[in-house]
Image (spheres, grey):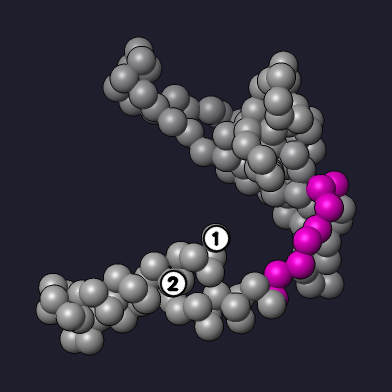
Amino acid sequence: MLRDTARIQEEDARFANRRRSSKHHPALPLFTERDAERALEMLRPVPFGTDIEISPALTTTIHHAGHILGAASIRLSDGTHPILFSGDLGRNDDPVMRPPATPPAAEHIVVESTVTADTPTKTPPTVRCPTPPGTS
C-alpha cells in the first residue's frame, strides 16, 4: 500500500506540474517510491504480546485490539510509568475478528474517542482517573 501511495503522489505531482494547478513550483510528491522502499526496508514484523526494547530504558508491547485486521493497542513503559495507546477496540463476540486482548495495566491511557450526533451532550465525555499514589 505504501508503494501504491507513493506512485499516486508522484503521478499527482506530475499532473499538477503539467496543468500548473499547484501553488508550488514545481509541485513535489510528499514521498516517492524510492522513499517508500527505503522505509519498508526498516520495518520488521513483530508478534503481538512480544516485549520490544526500543532503548535500554524503554520497552513496547503491542496487543490485539480486535477492531480490524492488524489493529493494535500499544503499551510503552520505562519500567515505572507505563502508558497505553489505543484506537477503536473490537467486540468480544465478533464472528469474524479475534476479540481484543485485555488491556494491560497502565498508569496513563490515551484513546481515540468519537462523539456523534447520537451523543446526548454537546461536550465530549470526560474520564477522570485517580492520581496514582506518590504522584501528587
Inspect the image, locate mark 2, and give the three-letter code of the amino acid beneath it: Arg
Quadrant location, the C terminus: top right
Which of the pair 81/76 is nearer the observer? 76
Callout 1: 10 Å neighbours few (<14), some, many (20+)?
few
Which residue sits at x=22%, y=86%? 26
Q: Which residue is mark 1?
A: 1
Inspect the image, locate mark 1, and give the three-letter code of the amino acid beneath it: Met
Q: Position of residue 72 (x, y in %)?
A: 68, 44
Q: Main secondary structure of the magenta part?
A: loop
Marking on residue 7: 2
Which of the pair 86/28 is nearer the observer? 28
Looking at the rendered structure, the secondary structure element under dot 2 is helix
Looking at the rendered structure, the secondary structure element under dot 1 is loop
Which residue sits at x=44%, y=25%? 125
Q: Quadrant of residue 107?
A: top right
Q: Determine if residue 80 is in view.
A: no
Q: Earlier in the sequence, mark 2 or mark 1?
A: 1
What segment is highlighted magenta in the picture? 42-49
Which residue sits at x=65%, y=73%? 40
Q: Quadrant of residue 57?
A: bottom right
Quadrant location, the N terminus: bottom right
Q: Determine if residue 124 is in view.
A: yes
